[in-house]
Image (cartoon, rainbow, N blue to C red):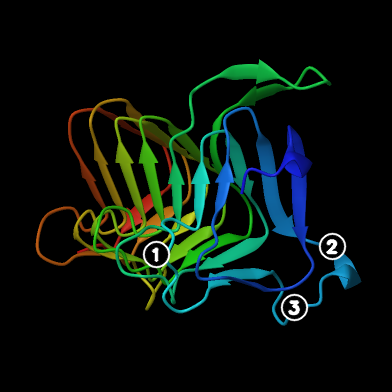
Amino acid sequence: TNDPALDGKATIEMLMDYVMPAQDALLIPDGYDIKITTANGSAYKGEGPYAVISTENGFAKDPMFENEGALTFTGIVLNGKNMKVSSEMVRSNAKEIDDSDDEGTEVKNGLYIEDNASFINANNTGNGGAVHISKRKAYISGGSFENNKADKGGAIYVSSGGLEITGSNIGVPGKGNHANEGGAIYYTGGGTVKIEGGSIAYNQADTGNGGGIYAENGTFEIKGGSIINNT
């Protein structure tokens, strides 16, 4: 939805769990800086600690969120259990633009995944179960990816873009991510992946290579974190 009410920079605080209608989806246009999170304290009326965004059965749009600007998820759950099996939950094609907000803080277009943001139960016959990044960059400093599936990149697929991970649990016991190649992450097409923290564990490549990570044609830097128990 290209809503003028969301012009520029805004925070969307979820007051309750939300089921997207079958024909709905949210576009973050270039030039927008949007954060999606759960409302604080008693304002939130949902059942769990964080608001859950899911879809109706037969969700006809792909993906749930398409980002061309700056999009941040923090303190929120995206559940893809009812999506059709040919789409990821979040697609980010943001242009890499450096800008400043009114307070002089640097703003970069891209996808930001922060504390207590969870991506669960996606099932994509294409690439990237939870997140598909194309020619741009994603910054993951927290949250988790659990029980997501795809052809390539069960949790995350990166094509000719960049990925920085400083903290996240990508796969947990009993709820790892699966793909034919790159159970957790599939990376291709140049650019740089940097891993400085977090955990990539209990993920599986069902028919090919890279239970945890499959990487080709780029720069891959690991300076911290753990990559264990992937098959």
**Residue sitting farthest toward the left:** 207
Sequence-earlier tag: 3 or 1 = 3
Amino acid carrying label 1: it is Gly
Residue drawn at x 68%, y 73% as measured from the top left = 17
Amino acid carrying label 3: it is Gly
Query: Which marked residue is nearer to the observer: mark 2 or mark 3?
Result: 3
Residue drawn at x 18%, y 53% as measured from the top left = 210
**Residue sitting farthest toward the right:** 42
Give coordinates of residue 35: x percent, y percent.
69, 46
Residues marked 2 and 3 touching at CB (< 8 Å)? no
Image quarter for residue 117?
bottom right
Task: Name the disc covering residue 46, or none.
Answer: 3
Residue drawn at x 78%, y 43% as measured from the top left = 5
CA separation, marks 3 and 1? 25 Å
Q: Residues within 10 Å of mark 3 (few under 14, many from 20)?
A: some
Amino acid carrying label 2: it is Asn
- Please say if 44 is above or below 215: below
- Please say if 196 is above or below 56: above
CA separation, marks 2 and 1? 27 Å
Residue bearing the label numbered 2: 40
Give coordinates of residue 120: x percent, y percent.
46, 68
